[in-house]
Amino acid sequence: MSPLVLITGASSGIGQALALQYVRQGYRLALVARRTDVIRSWLSPYEISADSYQIYNGDVSDTSSMATVAQDCLARQGAPDVVIANAGISIGVDSSRRDDLDVMARILATNVVGVAATFGPFINAMTARGSGTLVGMASVAGIRGLPGHGGYCASKAAVISYCESLRGELRPTGVKVVTICPGYIATPLTQNNSYSMPFLMQPEAFAKHAFKAIQAQVSYRVIPWQMGIVAKLLRLLPNGLFDKAFAGRPRKPRAAGSD
Ligand SMILES: NC(=O)c1ccc[n+]([C@@H]2O[C@H](COP(=O)([O-])OP(=O)(O)OC[C@H]3O[C@@H](n4cnc5c(N)ncnc54)[C@H](OP(=O)(O)O)[C@@H]3O)[C@@H](O)[C@H]2O)c1
């Protein structure tokens, strides 16, 4: 039986590109998103055989929904070899505005709790088998707190720390935890950014590099590599210099409908 990968956020961008990369490498797919019709529509031209994939309707910010997805997946396709918690949202937050605090809660529920809700229901099956890879999609934005991007940066910093904790917890079991930090990838998530996006990468190229890193079970990888250097420099930059260099950076667009 060919190996199985479960990918959340498979209706768009990085998740879609990862799904195509994995199917080309002989994997069966378990594809998760709220917009399952969108998954069906991008998948249909590829003529992927019906027994190679299943589509699941799941909301990663709802732990019960993800428990149901996992139960269905275990029953229909078995325990995945790789689980990629990729679903995420990026919205600007102005902390002085009451409505934006609800947006912040939504970002954390999706980007942070959503990762744990995706991994959690598979951990017992994977540890019982003694193998498997859990992949958290973090971001270079999780390395330092960029002005104008507080909710998202906080959420991705949490993903990096959470995956690091889990990696240590699961080390004796044979289950690996891989943290991937994308730089700027050309997807719907970045298309309205008003600031420059150095080393912008196409999702297909990103997926090839991510696949290799996940297969190698590296603990942590920044993609593209140029952003890896930027990420290392960002870490080293003293607080005073960082604050000066990034002060006044434009805010990521706030939620639609907010004034
Ligand atoms: N693009 C970049 O430059 C970049 C950089 C660093 C990190 N990342 C991270 O990479 C991941 C994928 O981003 P992308 O660029 O591919 O964005 P995207 O094209 O906007 O795709 C986001 C995906 O997440 C899913 N999603 C959002 N909320 C969800 C929820 N509550 N439940 C289930 N699925 C949900 C969406 O599916 P539905 O709406 O159909 O549910 C969609 O498939 C995110 O975690 C993002 O933070 C991206």
Image (cartoon, rainbow, N blue to C red):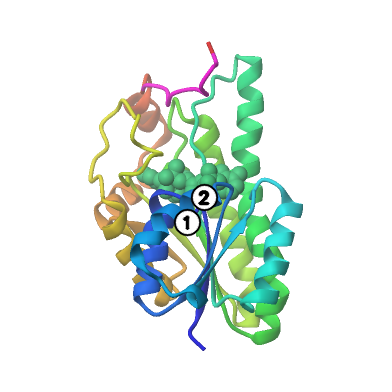
Name the residue nearer the viewer: 149 or 83.
Answer: 83
Image location of residue 75, percent across then percent down: 70, 75
Residue 73 place in picture, x, y as percent? 65, 70
Query: Of residues 259 and 146, which is closer to you in this image?
Result: 259
Q: Is residue 258 visible?
A: yes
| Rendered image: mark on residue 40 | 1
Q: Is residue 28 above or below residue 223?
A: below
Q: Please state which amino acid type lies under the numbered disc 1.
A: Arg
| Residue density around tag 1, few if under 14, some if 14–19, many if 20 or more, within 10 Å | few
Q: In the rendering, which numbered label is found on residue 37?
A: 2
Instruction: From the viewer's perspective, tell me whether residue 169 is left or right of residue 33.
Output: right
- In this rendered view, identify the residue nearer to me: 100 or 246: 100
Residue 253 in which image quadrant: top left
Q: Which region is colored magenta? A: 250-258
Q: Is residue 4 left or right of residue 220?
A: right
Give the Cα distance between marks 2 and 1.
5 Å
Determine whether, in the image, residue 203 is placed left or right of residue 89.
Answer: left
Q: What percent of the width, then of the height, locates residue 155? A: 56, 42
Residue 257 belongs to the span the image colors magenta: yes
From this view, report whether residue 116 is shown above or below residue 208.
above
- Graded by Cα atoms within 10 Å as few (under 14), some (14 to 19) or many (20 or more), the crowding at tag 2 reads few
Q: Residue furthest bottom?
A: 1
Q: Is residue 217 above or below residue 256?
A: below
Image position, residue 62 (x, y; %): 71, 47
In contact (CB < 8 Å): disc 2 and disc 1: yes
**Is label 1 within 8 A of ligand 1 (CB to nearest ligand atom)?**
no
